[in-house]
Image (cartoon, coloured by chain):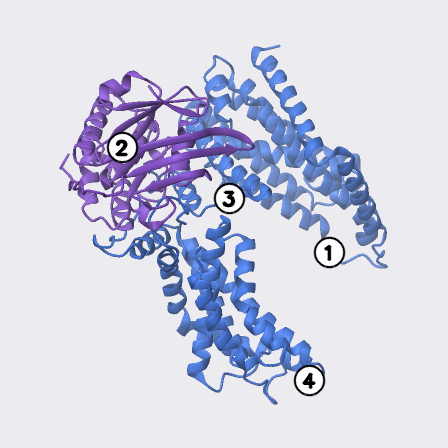
Amino acid sequence: MPPSDPIPPTTGAPHPLVASGVRVRLGGVAIIEEAALDLAAGDLVLLTGPNGAGKSTLLRALVGLLPASGEVRVQGHPPSSLAAKGAFAFAPDEPALYEDLTLAEHVRFQALLYGRPEAEQRTLAVLDAFDLTPKLGEFPGTHSRGMRQKLSLALTLGLALPLTLLDEPFNGLDLVSQERLAAALAERTREGGAVLLTGHQRELGGLLGARTVALRDGRLQDA
Amino acid sequence: MTAIGWLRRRTLARAVRAYVSWIGRAVGWWTIGYLLFWVAVFVTAGIESLPRTDVPPALPLAAVAGGLAAVAFLALFVVGRTPTVVLDRRDLYRLGLAPAVPGHVLGVRLSERRLWRAAVGAAAGGVWSLVAPASFHLDAPWAAPALALLAVAHADLGWLRYAGFRRSDAEGRAARNGARWAVLGAVVLAALGAAPAPWGVLGLAGALTSAHPGTLLAPAALAAAGLVLVRRSLASRWPPRFAAQSLVLTQLQAMRTLRLLAGVAGMVSGREADAAERERLLATLHDRPGATRPRRSLRPPALGRRPWRALAWRAASALARRRPLAHLQVAAWSLGAVAAGWAAAPALVGDPLPAGGAPGVAQVVGAADPLGAAVVTALGVLGAAWLAARAGAASIGPDLPRGTVPVDASERTRGRLAVPVVVLAAAALPAYALAGALRGWVGLGAAGQEPLLTAMALAALLVTVLVALEKYATWTGVAAGAWEATLVAALVATLPSLLLGLFGVPGAALPLQLVLLVLLWWLPV
């Protein structure tokens, strides 16, 4: 995959993600209690926890898709602001795709929406690494779960934004694609991007060389 | 009892119990009984209030009924590409692949369909039995069972057409030939109805014009033939494309159900992106191009262009990929909207109603009641606005949910409205020709004294409608094409002319319209 422009570490520059005292309540039930997280440029953090621990909920709260109390800043901005939205990319566990666009059209559409022309080549390179180049002219609705997941990941990683959040990114991928994804994540952090991902397997942290944080009973603990 | 039958009985009983419980909780069975009671009262009262004609109408009823029946059965020759009965995913994977006779697996679904058709046929026949004596001086006591039997036969022959559609194996040929001969038999029997007694009694629709119990013979024979033929068609093999088409049809059904449930619950529903997925699924169902790859693509904007260009390109692509019928629909809505807008625009700039000319509705009302004229004028503007909202909804393209994409509201609105604005602008000239006639018919006055001002008023009205539609649909999550969204957009856009017309200062409507447009545009939604 071609290298993206590294984000220069500036003294005093705000961290890609700073969250403190984050609480999420859904239907009157506390899902997340007082979560705090700080990701600097180049950090790779794996959020683990059993099924139903609230990993996806926390990720959605961090990007402003779920109401949460506490303080969340993306590059120093609230996550719902345009400045923050232009600084992070999020891939949910269930790929959120535009069913009316082909894969190639997804790539161009995404590059135009984010105002990042260079993202097109990077995304195409990731899709090529995932062996999806022959499928560029097809609608994703005809593709398998794994292929849709690859497209979602390629669109997210291709943007090369300061903060990348991936919810269960390894689910549904074949072994070769898992290795390629791991390489892409390592490259992203080498370039200065911060990555926060979720997963069930604790050994994944060791394999990726990531800092592992566990979510238990709604609280974050270093694993 | 077969294993399939046992399994079916258990799952059906459980489903029925759950359904009864759910309806009871959601609506209440006493409430349903109460409503049904009043429906029965109103239907009975309605039928009793029908005046008995002194002389029966001079209609060849037997020939008309036979002709209709023949057309209904002949119409089966143009259907058959898709299954009339499907299995859902669970049944396909669990029962469809089991070593069981297909007829046993599909039996319950076919029976369900027959039951529904029979109920509808019986209801229609029952109404005919009650109405016929008063209105046509006829006794038709067997109409309900006869129509129920015909409806069952029609359902079975519909399945048979599918079972034999483009199949060259023995089962396919047998199904195709069976359907062909059964339909031809139905047509012959229908023609027999026009023959004099006693042969007329044997006509297919004889029960509608005769009280003889023998009129049930032909429908019963056709229904029995259908049952036997359907059973034979599913004795050993499934139709080749049944499983694949079942999956697609259940997906389409699931989309409809989800949209319905979401709509009932007042939740986010009917996103326009569904339309693209639906088109793709329909292409898959009918083996048309466009199932995996688009039939046509528009050149995307160059990299580095503003985000609104990307949204406009997506909307244009979605429109270009729709079927010709959808294009005609967009053209009709747009032409209607601009023509109605041209007709109503003079009211927006406060032109007085003409003293002469054809007496339109507003003039007639206005002569006696100025307030009534204002209301009629406002309704004309509202009608034009609603048509514009429909045109906009048909061409606005897929939505962009308010999520994590860094696109601000005005950029999104501009991008999504680019195509509808172009479509409406293209309709301006042809619509102008239509507007003169429409203006006289609706009675909204003569053409404006100030053509430029009138054109401005029209443009302001149409753009306000589109902006209101886009903002409201995005804010609430309802589809732009939903009645709610189009009505709200039309009402919001006509507020200035409606209010100022009622207060007697219609001349100020245009400035207020422009103020409203600016306010809507800058709404951070």
Chain identifier matching the purple colour in the rendered picture? A
- Which of the two labelled residues, at mark 4 and mark 3, occupies the earlier sequence position? 3
Asked if residue B68 is positioned above or below residue A155 in the image, the reply reads below
Closest to the camera, between mark 4 and mark 3, is 3
Q: Amino acid at mark 1?
A: Leu
- Residue marked by disc 4: B367
Estimate how packed mark 3 is, as few (under 14), some (14 to 19) or many (20 or more) residues with alpha carbons within 10 Å: some
Chain identifier matching the blue colour in the rendered picture? B
Seen from the viewer's position, the closer of residues B309 and B357 is: B309
Q: Amino acid at mark 3?
A: Val
Name the spot of residue B507 as percent of width and height, x first.
Answer: 54, 82
Any part of residue B236 in sight? no
- Residue marked by disc 2: A195
Closest to the camera, between mark 3 and mark 2, is 2
* Circles 4 and 3 on the same subunit: yes
- Residue marked by disc 1: B59
- Which of the two labelled residues, at mark 4 and mark 1, occupies the earlier sequence position? 1
- The residues tagged by marks 3 and 1 sit, at their Cα atoms, a distance apart of 52 Å
